[in-house]
Image (cartoon, helix red, strand yellow):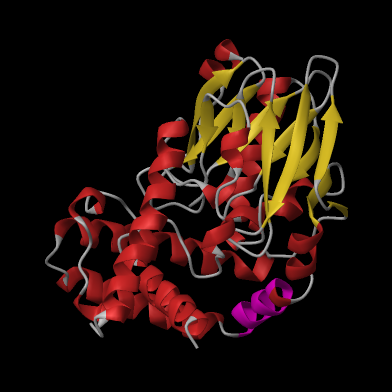
Amino acid sequence: MLNRIASFQGSRHFRLQYIADSTVAAVAVSGTGSLANAAIIDLGGLTLVVDTFATLEAAQELKAAAEHLTGNPVSYVINTHWHSDHTTGNQVFVPDAQLIATSGTHETMNSFARDRVAQYQNNREKMLEAIGEAELQCEQETDTKLQQEMAWENATDREFVNMLPQLVHTVPTITFDRQMTIHGSNRSAQLITYGGGHTQSDAVVYLPEDKVIIIGDLVLSNHHPVLANATPQEWLQIERLDVETIIPGHGEVCSLQQLHEVKGYISRMIAIVTEAVQNQQSIEEIVIPEEYRAWYFTTYFKTNLNKLYDLITASGD
């Protein structure tokens, strides 16, 4: 695929990165309507796309890239979980491609997520006002790194909200509960779920021949994990697989080192919050540990502390 990557006209939303003869990562460009990473997989006669970005324009360019790289239409789209930065572009791929997710992801997308999209569409003007206010706050931010992150978030939010009138919430129609395998003429892709973790139901796409895994938001590379909908105790069971390369939900393509870093982060945060609860310390006083200060998604640190505080105090009742 290397030659085809070089000849692709490009996209402002993502950059293509060769992973293996079967796989290309579409790594999101910060501050655009992609937000999360995606992947293109050529199984031989069958083209898979994993996740579909946060806007329709980004998804349309992803579809064009997949067709250019593989020479085939997209046969299947896999959603690793229900969050909109991984699923908004689904409508671009139907009816030609079949959409796949776990049963749990399907249930959430067909109920809560569908209602949330309708609310977004009905409140678009208020959302634009809120983005305008956030842009003013960004101008006043004195922390350079945080200001850059806020600017990226605001720009992505504005693209998302501007797109809402064209959005048709599109839910996968094929589901699985534990594992599903898709066979091409050259290799197979294993769709696996171990249950929850980042959300109530998360799936990964594993290519055993290439030792590659597309992992959704179970691993973020140099980003704070997002624990708002998470069950941290179920987070990472991926270590049992023979993996060398990870395409994470956000950040650069990485290795098992980043998986271990995310696992360490979660354990560290649980220990910090547990100690604060035992000492009756306010979690508002907790600052980001030194080793995580360079990570992106800075604003999620406080959100993560609050989530873990609620879990820990509830378990102590």
The percent position of residue 25, horizontal first and vertical second, equals 55, 31
Q: Observer-nearest residue: 148 or 256?
A: 256
Dominant secondary structure (helix, strand or loop) of the stretch shown in magenta: helix
- Residue 107 placement, left or right of 230: right
**Is 87 rendered above or below residue 113?**
above
- Considering every residue shown, the one lying at the far left of the view is 142
Q: Observer-nearest residue: 118 or 86?
A: 86
Residue at the spot 40% in from the left edge and 33% down from the top edge: 257
* Quadrant in the rendering for residue 200: bottom right
The percent position of residue 116, horizontal first and vertical second, equals 65, 77
- Residue 129 placement, left or right of 169: left
Chain part drawn in magenta:
113-122
Residue at the spot 63% in from the left edge and 31% down from the top edge: 241
* Number of numbered labels in the structure image: 0
| Residue 254 visible at all | no
Q: Observer-nearest residue: 77 or 314?
A: 314
- Residue 297 placement, left or right of 203: left
Residue at the spot 81% in from the left edge and 42% down from the top edge: 179
The percent position of residue 252, horizontal first and vertical second, equals 41, 36
**Is 6 rendered above or below residue 256?**
above
- Residue 37 placement, left or right of 59: left
* Quadrant in the rendering for residue 282: bottom left
- Considering every residue shown, the one lying at the far top of the view is 3
**Is 236 rendered above or below residue 303?**
above
| Residue 62 visible at all | yes
User: Quarter holding the N terminus?
Assistant: top right
Tell me if residue 121 is in the magenta stretch: yes
The percent position of residue 201, horizontal first and vertical second, equals 69, 59
